[in-house]
Image (tube, grey):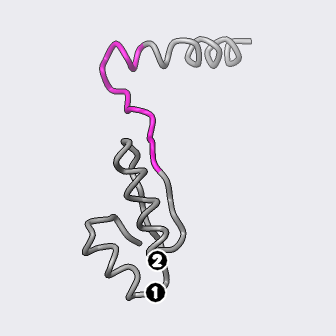
Amino acid sequence: MVIIGTVLLQSATASSLARWLRVTEPEPRGFLIVGANRVAREIALRLRKIGYRTLLADTSWENTEKARREVFETY
């Protein structure tokens, strides 16, 4: 009963305590786009304009290099 009570108490108070201590992180907002071709870069550009973070992932060196030149995060 002590263990269950401790877990319940901690889970009920952890988020409030973190906010009070100002150690919370904002909810991540972003998209992983598989491919870095022209269409994917255009979609990423529009998402970035409305405030979303984007990451373009592609196996083509040419596509990722074009995306990097357009200042996108790539993988």
Few, some or many residues within 10 Å of mark 2 (<14, 14–19, 20+): some
Q: Residue at x 39, y 87 (%)?
A: 61
Residue 22 falls within the magenta-colored stretch: yes
The reply, left or right, for residue 65 in relation to residue 4 is left
Q: Amino acid at mark 2?
A: Asn
The reply, left or right, for residue 68 in relation to residue 28 is left
Few, some or many residues within 10 Å of mark 1 (<14, 14–19, 20+): few
Q: Which residue is mark 1?
A: 60
Quarter of the picture holding the N terminus? top right
Q: Quadrant of residue 11?
A: top right
Q: Residue at x 49, y 18 (%)?
A: 14
The front one of 23 and 38 is 38
Q: Which residue is mark 2?
A: 37
Disc marking residue 27: none
Q: Point out the stretch of residues depicted in magenta.
A: 17-30
Quarter of the picture holding the C terminus? bottom left
The local secondary structure at tag 1 comes to: loop
> Contact (CB < 8 A) between labels 2 and 1?
yes
The front one of 62 and 26 is 62
Mark 2 or mark 1: name the one nearer the start of the chain: 2
